[in-house]
Image: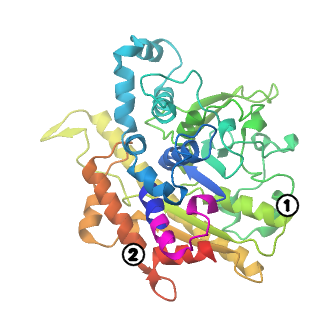
């Protein structure tokens, strides 16, 4: 969905921007991604903002549209599960991948991370790179934030291309009495101002907090940690080199959407830090969140536990119903998070003399067309899309971008573009 949104916004931007204006690609200062959105963000990073990017010479004014038209990019973003299956069964590996899964700590996350890197980073798919692209291979700007959730701290773990936590004694694994998801909603601004003093993103753990570095950390593993949804992927285990004897030897990372499914908290925390430590009266933030949640509840009585008239297994049926219930709770949690983010944006703007933050939500569930709604609700979250499902998403995004919004009832895409070029 993010691929279609960015291509649509770029097209609208081209209609409004002057010939000498920067391309949309070069107007973006940071990407904060979670879950499947991190796969798309890594495509942008490796294609346009990394050493030896394979598309650097292409027309940057059509960057997002050309990425959408690229067969390899579409395959990675829409068929990673199929690709992982092919990678697993590839006879060229001489059975090494199945053997690793059977005899070592290799798991589904490793399989998907290696598959994604193989497809994304190899100029020639017949010849693999000797070393995976690392976060340190990315350009210093724009900033890419791949958001995971740390099981030990129950707070975000953020991967980015260079150090952001300089004060090592403020390690979030040791406990930080600041949680944006709750403090913003309670309007506890004093705690916020205190928390942002030493480091940006003080509530989140980073690689430097566990004694590691972005220079050698594989980009594909940061992406899959951000997308490691429980029940499908194993957590990513990272050794805590900076921990003392009383702390766990490893930290476990799961899907970033468990804490914040939008990535907006990271973006707003960074903006707050810049405002506090590097004030600039001309600084503005255009914040766009893209949410592909497609149904209020994923519970389906026709689960795999029932085939026709037969119940194939009662415990299995309970598992599927349990997952469905968790999905329902997860949906309502994301609704609460959206309210929290809106509250925070409003508080920033109320404090400033002029509006500092323009916040735009592009939510799949805001599509009102009955036929499109029925179509997108049938799409499951499995890292695989059919061509028909992709067309439904594309049409749904077009519907959302053309929806009238704002006091002047302009198309949503036009309102967003006006904020970008002002």
Q: Which residue is mark 1?
A: 194
Horizontal and vertical percent for residue 232? 43, 36
**Of the image marks 1 and 2, the number of the one nearer the N terminus:** 1
Asked if residue 143 is among those painted magenta in the image, a careful observer would answer no
Front position in the image: 37 or 54:
54
**Colour setting:** rainbow
Horizontal and vertical percent for residue 400? 40, 70
Asked if residue 26 is among those painted magenta in the image, a careful observer would answer yes
Q: Which residue is mark 2?
A: 402
Q: Is residue 341 something that shows in the picture?
A: yes
Residue at image coords 69%, 29%: 216
Q: Is residue 65 above or below residue 109?
A: below
Q: Is residue 344 something that shows in the picture?
A: no
- The CA span between labels 1 and 2 is 41 Å
Span colored in magenta: 10-27
Residue 184: quadrant of the picture: bottom right
Q: With 334 as the anchor, is 168 left or right in this view? A: right
Callout 1 secondary element = helix
Name the image quarter holding the C terminus: bottom right
């Amino acid at each position: 969905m993010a691929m279609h949104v960015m291509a649509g916004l770029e097209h609208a931007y081209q209609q409004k921007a002057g010939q000498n204006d920067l391309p949309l690609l070069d107007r973006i200062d940071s990407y904060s991604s979670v879950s499947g959105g991190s796969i798309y963000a890594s495509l942008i990073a490796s294609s346009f903002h990394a050493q030896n990017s394979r598309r650097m010479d292409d027309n940057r004014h059509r960057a997002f549209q050309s990425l959408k038209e690229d067969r390899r990019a579409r395959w990675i973003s829409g068929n990673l599960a199929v690709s992982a299956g092919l990678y697993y069964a590839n006879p060229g590996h001489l059975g090494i991948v199945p053997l690793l899964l059977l005899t070592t700590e290799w798991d589904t996350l490793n399989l998907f991370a290696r598959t994604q890197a193989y497809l994304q980073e190899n100029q020639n798919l017949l010849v693999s790179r000797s070393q995976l692209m690392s976060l340190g291979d990315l350009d210093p700007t724009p900033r890419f934030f791949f958001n995971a959730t740390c099981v030990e701290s129950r707070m975000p773990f953020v991967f980015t291309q260079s150090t952001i936590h300089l004060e090592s004694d403020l390690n979030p694994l040791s406990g930080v009495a600041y949680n944006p998801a709750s403090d913003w909603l309670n309007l506890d601004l004093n705690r916020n101002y205190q928390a942002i003093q030493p480091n940006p993103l003080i509530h989140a753990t980073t690689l430097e907090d566990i004694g590691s570095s972005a220079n050698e950390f594989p980009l594909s593993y940061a992406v899959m940690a951000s997308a490691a949804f429980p029940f499908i992927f194993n957590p990513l285990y990272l050794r805590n080199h900076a921990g003392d004897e009383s702390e766990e030897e490893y930290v476990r990372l799961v899907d970033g959407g468990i804490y914040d499914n939008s990535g907006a908290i990271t973006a707003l925390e960074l903006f707050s830090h810049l405002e506090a430590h590097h004030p600039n009266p001309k600084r503005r933030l255009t914040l766009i969140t893209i949410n592909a949640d497609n149904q209020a509840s994923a519970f389906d009585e026709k689960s795999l536990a029932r085939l026709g008239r037969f119940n194939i297994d009662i415990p299995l049926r309970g598992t599927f119903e349990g997952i469905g219930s968790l999905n329902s709770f997860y949906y309502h949690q994301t609704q609460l998070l959206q309210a929290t983010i809106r509250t925070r944006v409003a508080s920033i703007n109320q404090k400033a003399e002029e509006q500092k933050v323009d916040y735009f939500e592009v939510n799949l569930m805001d599509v009102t067309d009955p036929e499109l709604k029925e179509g997108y609700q049938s799409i499951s979250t499995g890292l695989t899309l059919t061509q028909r499902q992709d067309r439904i998403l594309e049409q749904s995004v077009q519907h959302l971008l053309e929806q009238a919004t704002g006091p002047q009832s302009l198309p949503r895409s036009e309102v967003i573009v006006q904020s970008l070029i002002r």
